[in-house]
Amino acid sequence: MRILAVILLIVISTGINAQGTVKSFVLGADRFKHYVDYFNKMEDENIRQAIPNDSAWGWMKKNIPLFECPQQNFEEIFYYRWWTLRKHIKKTEQGFVFTEFLVQRSYADKYNLISSALGHHIYESRWLHDKKYMDDNLHVWYRGNEGKPLKKLRFYSSWNMDAIYNRYLVNGDKKFITDLLPELEADYAAWEEERKFPGGLFWQYDVRDAMEETISGGRKEKNPRPSINGYMFGNAMALAYINQMTGKTTGTIKYSADAAAIKLLLQKSLWSSNDEFFEVRKEQGDTLANVREEIGFIPWYFNMPDSQYNIAWKSLTDTKTFCAPFGITTADRSHPQFRTHGCCKCEWDGAVWPFATSQTLTAMANLLNNYRQNYVVDSNYFDLLETYVESQYYRGRPYVGEYLDEKTGYWLKGDEERSRYYNHSTFNDLVITGLVGLRPRADNTVEVNPLLPNQKWDWFCLDNILYHGKIVTIIWDKTGLKYKKGKGLSVWVNGKKAASSLKLERVTGKL
């Protein structure tokens, strides 16, 4: 009886019921079911994959964090994006995979897989409670071709290794990531062989950067770009960390040196002192393209540049450069070639792409957390994230597609079947790690730094977050009356308070 009592005490204290299902600490899941009921009624479900609409809510209850806030559109889009992500989980004979389009694409790999947004898929899905979905997906990508990678793994530029390591920072699954290390190192070596100039910079066609019809490049131009060089820096750093984790000194030294070399070259060769921005370097003529494009923010996605380059961010909130009524434009609005490449054929010459928006906001959160600078503040992050929320509607209903007009918010392929539920970006990861501010890390510390401006919301709660095998709850309650867990900001681990402050500020506690 004493043993049973101890077991029951452990179950109660950890928030896990006798069936092994994780219980939220504050929020009841069923209060959010009405969103899914509405989403299910919005459409004719003409394409069904592993988890159809009638199973969506049951799947979400088992898998997702819960979020509540006083601004209804933030809350609605949070649940909408989990609902749409679920649509892209496909069951194959080799396990689950994540698609980008629901409709079949001629240029896709096996199982209709496309590698361009795989990094986004990993970052977004790392918060799912059941890691099997992404475990399977990665095994298919890296071993699904008779034990070898799928043929089109490197069809597009990727930051897969960085994303896989950042997923480890959430789930702590050392066994999975170290088991995959040989395939990741082989992938990195192939990128070096296929896309690295003798001088050390990586190059890419704009279309294989998933960013065709740019002002700076072309489908046949082998240009060094801030995007792929940022990705390869992030990949090298991830491999250095994984090697260090496994005690492999040689690999740790090699990939750390690679990352340092890429960083040096990027800052030396892709920085425009005239535009104060990272830009594409034209292979022909060996000159900069002389156009600011949104990919110039990508290096901060990986905490890559030195602090003197932070001045680039002054252009982000400039309405003459990147800041448009319905989002962050993919090119400088003042450039003569802005939006000159036609309409509705996947142009990256200025229109707003969620793919790029989510990269820039991730980079911006890194800037606000990890750098000292005076160019952007928390309110800028919130304003841009709010615009991103507002853009994810079409004809009055929640919607995410390929790209949109920067002035009107009109989705440029909104009436095409291929565009709806386009799985080509993140959103919920931005809410969790940016707005609410849970900053994943490898050690036994939980760190939270909300990028919510003071006086914006009086309360919010992010609950049922599976982090390092524990359930984390983050509460902001200005008066203490909403959740009755105390005034201010508080962080709870398995129902026990780990950190708190009366203000919205960075707090840390022990897991």
Image: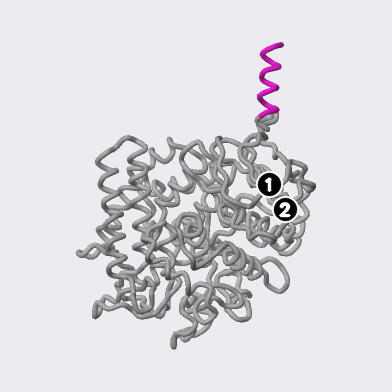
Residue 491 left/right relative to 266? right
Residue 221's x, y, as percent?
Answer: 31, 75
Residue 384 left/right relative to 334? right
* Contact (Cβ within 8 Å) of mark 1 with mark 2: yes
- Confirm whether the magenta stretch covers residue 2: yes
- Confirm whether the magenta stretch covers residue 220: no
Residue 227's x, y, as percent?
Answer: 39, 65
Q: Write down the residue under mark 2.
A: 459
Establish if 206 lies above or below 92: below
Q: As rendered, which of 322 and 451 lies closer to the eye?
A: 451
- Residue 221 seen in the figure: yes
Q: As rendered, which of 331 and 205 lies closer to the eye?
A: 331
Q: Which amino acid does label 2 sit on?
A: Trp
Residue 5's x, y, as percent?
Answer: 71, 17
- Residue 94 seen in the figure: no
Q: As rendered, which of 317 and 124 lies closer to the eye?
A: 317
Q: Write down the residue under mark 1.
A: 475
Residue 101's x, y, as percent?
Answer: 54, 63
Establish if 161 lies above or below 282: above
Q: As rendered, which of 341 and 16 lies closer to the eye?
A: 16
Pointer 2 local density, CA inside 10 Å: few below 14, some 14–19, many at least 20: many
Residue 303 left/right relative to 475? left
- Kindly state the secondary structure of the residue where label 2 is placed: strand
What main secondary structure does the magenta stretch of the protein show? helix
Q: Which residue is drawn at 57% across and 64% down?
A: 381
Magenta-drawn segment: 1-13
Q: Which amino acid does label 1 sit on?
A: Ile
